[in-house]
Image: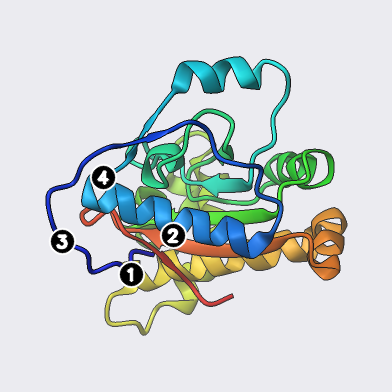
């Protein structure tokens, strides 16, 4: 999402607290700009204490995330936000389970969040495991077979890709976006009314860049 070509020594900028974002396109732009600051090392100097105090009276996040549970994927940092800005649901493989979808519905319907984001990432271990165990998911321990089974469609569709893992990760994001739309009447209604959008993208662990995928 980084499109800036500015150069120079990065310096932190003080942020007293963003105004409430209610427009989906403005929410996307806020994420783009935050990711650019993160990549350049010029993130805002957030007053987290003030944000914590504000949050005690309620929350109004401008984006709701399904993100992989990977410890290297932290939306608040990647998009340079403070407490209360993002509503984040984490699960390995960024899979939209019923519980995850219900959580997103709460954010959209009750908190009036204007943007839903599916956030995959490079070198995703869950997707890699799905590829490796495409023909024998039951050999995985515990509940991992159940989790991997949700990723198999993307793995199958990516068989002919030159970089199969990267393609499967992208397809898994796309499939999750479709799944949210197909399974959630609440979110679909908000999207149809223009008050919400669903987007997805892949976060590159090396560069720090979040790139949107076509939806």
Q: Is residue 15 left or right of residue 36?
A: right
Mark 3 crowd level (few <14, some 14–19, many ≥20, 10 Å Cα): few
Considering only order in the chain, which callout, 2 or 4, is on the residue closer to the N terminus?
Answer: 2
**Helix, strand or loop under label 1:** loop
Residue in the image at 55% along x and 40% along y: 18
Q: Nearer the viewer, residue 143 or 27?
A: 27
Mark sitting on residue 42: 4
Q: Disc 4 versus disc 2: distance between alpha carbons?
A: 14 Å
- By what rule are the colours in the image chosen? rainbow
Residue position for label 2: 32
**Helix, strand or loop under label 4:** loop
> Which of the two discs, 4 and 2, sits closer to the camera?
4
Q: Nearer the viewer, residue 196 or 96?
A: 196
Pointers 4 and 1 in contact (C-beta within 8 Å): no
Residue in the image at 23% along x and 52% along y: 40
Considering only order in the chain, which callout, 1 or 4, is on the residue closer to the N terminus?
Answer: 1
Residue position for label 1: 3
Q: Is residue 49 left or right of residue 72?
A: right
Q: Disc 4 versus disc 1: distance between alpha carbons?
A: 15 Å
């Amino acid at each position: 999402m980084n499109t800036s070509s500015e150069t120079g020594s990065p310096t932190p900028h003080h942020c007293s607290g963003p105004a409430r974002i209610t427009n989906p396109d403005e929410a996307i732009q806020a994420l783009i700009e935050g990711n650019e600051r993160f990549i350049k090392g010029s993130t805002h100097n957030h007053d987290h204490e003030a944000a914590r105090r504000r949050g005690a009276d309620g929350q109004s996040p401008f984006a709701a995330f399904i993100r992989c549970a990977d410890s290297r994927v932290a939306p608040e940092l990647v998009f340079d936000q403070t407490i209360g800005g993002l509503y984040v649901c984490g699960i390995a493989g960024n899979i939209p389970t019923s519980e995850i979808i219900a959580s997103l519905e709460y954010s959209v319907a009750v908190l009036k969040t204007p943007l839903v984001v599916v956030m995959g990432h490079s070198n995703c271990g869950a997707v890699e495991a799905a590829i490796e165990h495409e023909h024998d998911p039951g050999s995985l321990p515990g509940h991992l077979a159940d989790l991997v089974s949700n990723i198999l469609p993307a793995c199958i569709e990516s068989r002919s890709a030159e970089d199969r893992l990267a393609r499967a990760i992208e397809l898994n994001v796309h499939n999750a976006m479709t799944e949210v739309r197909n399974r959630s009447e609440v979110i679909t209604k908000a999207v149809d009314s223009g008050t919400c959008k669903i987007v997805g993208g892949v976060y590159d662990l090396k560069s720090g860049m979040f790139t949107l995928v076509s939806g």
